[in-house]
Image (cartoon, helix red, strand yellow):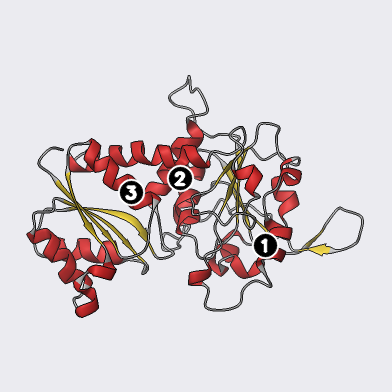
Amino acid sequence: MQGNVVANLFFEPSTRTRSSFELAAKRLSADTLNFSPGISSLSKGETILDTAKTYLAMGADMMVIRHREAGVPQMIASEMDRLGVKLSILNAGDGQHEHPSQGLLDLFTICSLFDFDNPCMKLLEDKKIVIVGDILHSRVARSNIWSLTATGAEVHLVAPPTLLPRLFIDFVGNQQPIKRADGDGEMANILDSPIPHNQSDLTHPLSSVGNRKLFLHWDIEPALQDADFIMTLRLQKERMSANLLPSLREYHQHYGITRDRLKLCKPDVKVLHPGPVNRGVEISSDLMDDPKLSLIAQQVTSGIAVRMALLYLIGSGKS
């Protein structure tokens, strides 16, 4: 990619994604331009589109875009198409919509643990992957639902009722509380029905999941039974406009990943987190730092290789 210019337009704070895209571009011998909203002309009234056009005028061949509003990368891409500009745009996370490169690097991290002899097999067939946390605000969850189910995994989403999107609940359907088999007679709101096999509404945000296996839970213990992987998500307090949780301490008590909870999983279970991590909230600190159980550092490393591949393939015009 020598001679190409990659512009990293990050309108939101980022450590892992921005740095790994920058490093990926440099390892491919591309030049980089880095944008920071705090020291840009946005504070003087410049629009997002004008900012993108400015970097285009500087010779950008590719733009990596992150924004707090869903659809901004698509909006910029549509404007460039309207202008007849040949420019590649990568979505580095847009609002609560998608984070495609994170979904790919998580998939790569998981699949790197296995040897696949049959190239036709579903990579994660019969693997149970549990995603725990702030599903409502997570673009990572949405991208991972697609990538993990597409490769054969059975995906279980676990969150408090206030942090599960209504659309997800409606999509799974049959949301009837069932009695928890723990002998205390307490009702547990566990949503454990798979996606209907006749789902064909292409306008639905989860329609691409098709007839793959997706389950919803409000109670973490049943979801963790025999899990192969746990992906815990950050509580995105900056996106919460209402008080959706009693306290962080209570959240950790009911949904935090600890060594005791791992006893419910398979013996070789691994834990992932897209970062940044709130230690002692989503996951216990000792578990996060255990290299035998945690894949969090490997996720960061995988991000560089995956983003190098994305830049190279897109920059060379390959799909």
The first of marks 1 and 2 along the sequence is 2
Q: Label 3 vs label 1: CA separation? A: 43 Å
> Would you name the residue on which mark 2 appears?
147
The three-letter code of the residue at mark 3 reads Ser
The first of marks 3 and 1 along the sequence is 3
Q: Nearer the viewer, mark 2 or mark 3?
A: 3
Q: Residue at x 57, y 69 (%)?
A: 166
SS type, badge 3? helix
Quadrant of residue 40 in the image?
Answer: bottom left
The three-letter code of the residue at mark 1 reads Asn
Residue 3, label in figure: none
Q: Residue at x 44, y 64 (%)?
A: 96
The residue positioned farthest toward the top in the image shown: 117
Seen in the image, is 271 located left or right of residue 106?
right
What percent of the width, then of the height, locates residue 45?
Answer: 20, 80
Seen in the image, is 297 located left or right of residue 18?
right
In the picture, which quadrant includes the N terminus?
top left
The three-letter code of the residue at mark 2 reads Ser
> Would you name the residue on which mark 1 appears?
174
What percent of the width, then of the height, locates residue 253?
Answer: 73, 59
